[in-house]
């Protein structure tokens, strides 16, 4: 591993930057310039950023150097997924519908990061509404491949040495998937560990923040910052960890290369001394994927029928139909304007649960054999 002194500043980890600035070996402005130079050289190909203002970022770095804060992220540039509110940059949720949307205050996670001395570099690309329709970001290791989503820009920017750390979010796989695709560390915390005030809600019962970084030390550091506690060193493992290997009911549908990678990882961990054992979940979990597909179909059916929900929620459900159209799950014309005046997404989530219960009570079994492609026309 290269020492920090032998690497360009933009390749330094957050922990290395904090140590160097604290010792007077570099400045926040120098680190920020190195990151911006890398972005200038690569952004046209990678497309990781959606709102970037180099002059603003440099001004913030100079302001830090004039009055250096001595926090755990002192002088570290950071990126933010474009569903996390910032008072000094637009937060557009990855959609032209909300282009120019300007919150009047920072999300809680942003306020905590700034308080710790972090300096915002810019906002990173997200899939539209952190859902399925992809943005322009490409995998920095192979521009012909996807970076994964929905935190695509944050993962790609960290992987390409444009920024040392970035925040994403996760509802199902939106942090760990792009981290895996782009070859960086991705941390999805336990639900409820971090504050989500000021973060666009996709599902209140599933959403979390996500941390993207190039070292485990940086993951641990940023996690403690977001918890509002003093940073702790990663403790040595006193005994070999016990790790479960779960092969889900859809294991036979997983691509052979992916199955091989998972099993190779288990073998490598076992060789290193970990206690690896197979995990089996109750049979009820076998229907989880079908339940998810059925719930989506129930949303479409209820939206098509008009239902008895408030008009704002019906418009939100129409927006979900639009998303399904955009990713090819259905035919017909989706209307972008249907998303205007959307209900809060937690209302949609509650509505979805209500729709699912109601439909289930009226013979959901007759729909169980339909595929996800069988949504009714608009």
Image: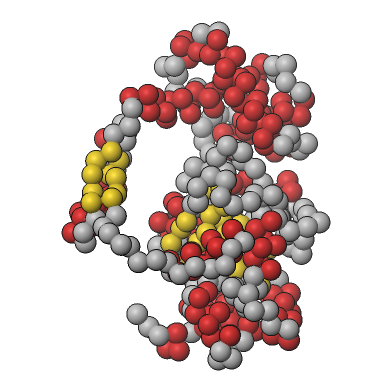
- For the C terminus, the image quarter is top right
Q: Position of residue 230 (x, y in %)?
A: 57, 67
321 w.r.t. 145: above or below: above
Q: Does residue 266 show up? A: yes
292 w.r.t. 366: above or below: below
Asked if residue 222 lies left or right of residue 145, the reply is: right
Residue ID at (55%, 10%):
361
Q: Position of residue 318 (x, y in %)?
A: 67, 29
Q: Residue furthest right?
A: 104
- Asked where in the image residue 114 lies, by quadrant, the reply is bottom right
Q: Position of residue 73 (x, y in %)?
A: 59, 73
Q: Nearer the viewer, residue 329 or 117?
A: 117
Q: Position of residue 322 (x, y in %)?
A: 63, 34
231 w.r.t. 190: above or below: below
Q: How is the image coloured?
A: secondary structure
Asked if residue 376 lies left or right of residue 180, the reply is: right
């Amino acid at each position: 591993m290269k020492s920090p002194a032998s690497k360009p500043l933009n390749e330094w980890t957050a922990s290395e930057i904090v140590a160097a600035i604290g010792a007077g070996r570099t400045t926040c402005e120098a680190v920020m310039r190195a990151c911006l130079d890398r972005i200038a050289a690569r952004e046209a190909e990678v497309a990781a950023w959606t709102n970037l203002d180099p002059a603003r970022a440099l001004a913030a770095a100079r302001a830090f150097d004039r009055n250096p804060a001595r926090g755990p992220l002192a002088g570290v540039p950071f990126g933010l997924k474009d569903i996390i509110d910032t008072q000094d940059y637009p937060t557009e949720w990855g959609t032209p519908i909300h282009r120019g949307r300007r919150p009047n205050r920072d999300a809680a996670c942003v306020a905590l990061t700034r308080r710790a001395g972090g300096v915002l570099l810019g906002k990173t690309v997200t899939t539209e509404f952190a859902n399925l329709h992809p943005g322009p970001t490409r995998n920095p290791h192979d521009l012909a491949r996807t970076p994964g989503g929905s935190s695509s820009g944050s993962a790609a920017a960290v992987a390409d040495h444009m920024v040392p750390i970035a925040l994403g979010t996760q509802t199902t796989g939106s942090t760990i998937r792009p981290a895996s695709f782009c070859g960086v560390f991705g941390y999805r915390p336990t639900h409820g560990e971090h504050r989500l005030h000021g973060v666009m809600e996709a599902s209140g019962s599933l959403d979390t923040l996500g941390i993207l970084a190039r070292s485990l030390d940086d993951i641990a550091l940023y996690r403690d910052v977001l918890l509002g506690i003093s940073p702790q060193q990663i403790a040595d493992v006193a005994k070999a960890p016990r790790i479960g290997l779960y092969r889900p009911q859809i294991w036979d549908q997983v691509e052979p290369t992916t199955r091989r990678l998972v099993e190779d990882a288990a073998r490598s961990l076992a060789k290193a001394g970990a206690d690896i054992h197979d995990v089996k979940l109750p049979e009820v979990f076998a229907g989880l994927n079908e339940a998810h597909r059925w719930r989506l179909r129930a949303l479409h059916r209820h939206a098509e029928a008009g239902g008895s929900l408030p008009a704002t929620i019906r418009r939100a459900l129409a927006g979900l139909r639009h998303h399904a159209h955009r990713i090819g799950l259905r035919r017909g014309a989706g209307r972008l304007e249907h998303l205007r005046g959307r209900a809060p997404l937690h209302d949609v989530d509650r509505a979805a649960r209500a729709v699912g219960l109601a439909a289930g009570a009226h013979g959901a079994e007759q729909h169980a054999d339909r595929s996800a492609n069988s949504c009714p026309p608009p």
